[in-house]
């Protein structure tokens, strides 16, 4: 799965923009306040920060009646963005950059996760990245962000993942986690919370799995200490223009929401079970491995640029062939 919009489909949508949601319409695209706003959330633990802000009433005045819905894969997310159904969403950070470079007026507001990828294995001989040489492992989302991060790190170690190891790809991280937990695979690249799920499921069957390698730590070693800004919050420019109060509410509320999540993890886990369909024990256990933050995209621009440059080196189409403009990065 490459998770990229078909170029012909995207160009077709953009061409229809004069009559649709992406064009500048005669009337406002979003009323002020932004009534009935649908907020889309990535199915990972860092989205709990946005859920908490909504649940706490922090967006009530700026976006009365706002609703929250998880998207299940990046194709669904892209479709919602391009169609104009959603103007506020948590997302892998390359998705809004890709679409902004293709002409959609999107901005990256904040980073919520500084990396949540691990190599999980029952093979105790795997203790460093180079120990993967000659091994078989399971991956997911081929040629999309998790796979590209892994391949970039491999390249930094002078390794070719297509030659120096054997990777079998599955559609989703949970499928990989289930294979690992059932003993049908020894090693897998997993995101969180599936990594925690695999470890917990295997333990019930009497098998031991370990987080053998933190890919975010490997990334920092190869990028002068810069972190891996994987997930964030993006917003449509028209939403900013028509409802500046919403941007103000996000800026004032995201950090307190993050602080609440990290200080009351049991309550955060219960909220995740209610709103994100993640079992509370699994969420609570995975949160420690998620590197949750709430930092402005502009403040973390050096790390984002390093990340985007690495993606461009491997797969230029991931970002439509170039870095996003300076105006793409907002302050929090």
Image: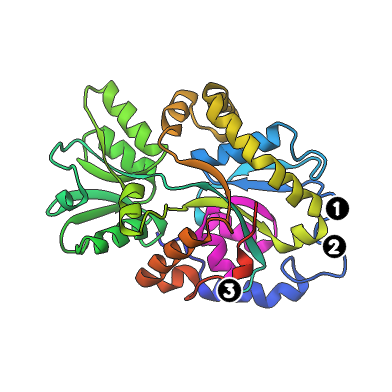
| Discs 1, 3 touching: Cβ within 8 Å | no
Q: Main secondary structure of the magenta part?
A: helix
Q: Secondary structure at mark 2?
A: loop
Closer to the camera, 249 or 223? 223
Query: Circle 3 sits on which residue?
Result: 102
Is 114 left or right of 168, judged from the image as shown? right
Q: Do residues under tags 2 and 1 come within 8 Å of each other at their CB atoms?
A: yes
Return the x and y of residue 144 as percentages of the image width and height. Answer: 40, 60
Measure the alpha-carbon separation of dots 1 and 3: 27 Å
The first of marks 1 and 3 along the sequence is 1
Rendered residue at 59%/33% (across/down): 259
Q: Height in image: 326 above or below 201?
A: below
Q: Which residues are magenta?
A: 75-101
Q: Which residue is mark 2?
A: 28
- The residue that appears at 69% across and 60% down in the rendered structure is 236
Identify the residue shown where x is 12% and y is 54%.
134
Q: Residue 26 lies in what quarter of the image?
A: bottom right
Q: CA distance from mark 3 to mark 2?
A: 23 Å
Residue 215, position as x, y percentages in the image? 32, 49
Which residue in the protein does label 1 denote?
32
Task: Report whether 27 appears left or right of 283.
Answer: right
- Secondary structure category for the residue under label 3: loop
Residue 234 on the magenta segment: no
Q: Is residue 272 visible?
A: no
């Amino acid at each position: 799965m490459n998770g990229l919009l078909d170029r012909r489909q995207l160009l077709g949508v953009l061409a229809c923009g004069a009559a649709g949601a992406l064009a500048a319409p005669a009337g406002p695209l979003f009323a002020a306040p932004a009534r009935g706003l649908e907020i889309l959330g990535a199915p990972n633990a860092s989205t709990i920060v946005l859920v908490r802000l909504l649940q706490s009433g922090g967006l009530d005045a700026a976006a009365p009646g706002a609703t929250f819905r998880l998207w299940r894969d990046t194709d669904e997310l892209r479709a919602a963005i391009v169609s104009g159904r959603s103007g506020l969403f948590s997302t892998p950070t390359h998705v809004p950059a890709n679409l902004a470079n293709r002409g959609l007026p999107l901005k990256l507001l904040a980073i919520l996760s500084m990396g949540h990828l691990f190599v999980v294995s029952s093979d105790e001989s795997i203790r460093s990245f180079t120990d993967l040489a000659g091994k078989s492992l399971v991956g997911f989302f081929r040629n999309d962000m998790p796979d590209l991060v892994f391949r970039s790190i491999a390249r930094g170690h002078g390794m070719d993942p297509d030659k120096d190891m054997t990777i079998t790809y599955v559609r989703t991280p949970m499928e990989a986690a289930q294979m690992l937990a059932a003993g049908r695979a020894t090693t897998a690249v997993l995101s969180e919370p599936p990594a925690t799920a695999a470890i917990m499921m295997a333990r019930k069957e009497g098998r031991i799995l370990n987080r053998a390698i933190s890919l975010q730590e490997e990334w920092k070693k190869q990028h002068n200490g810069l972190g891996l800004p994987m997930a964030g919050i993006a917003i449509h420019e028209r939403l900013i223009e028509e409802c500046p109060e919403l941007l103000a509410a996000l800026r004032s509320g995201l950090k307190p929401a993050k602080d609440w999540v990290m200080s009351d993890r049991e309550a955060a886990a219960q909220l995740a079970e209610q709103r994100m369909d993640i079992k509370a024990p699994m969420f609570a256990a995975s949160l420690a491995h998620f590197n949750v933050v709430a930092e402005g995209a502009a403040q973390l621009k050096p790390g984002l640029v390093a990340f985007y440059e690495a993606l461009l080196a491997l797969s230029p189409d991931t970002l439509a062939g170039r870095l996003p403009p300076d105006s793409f990065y907002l302050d929090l």
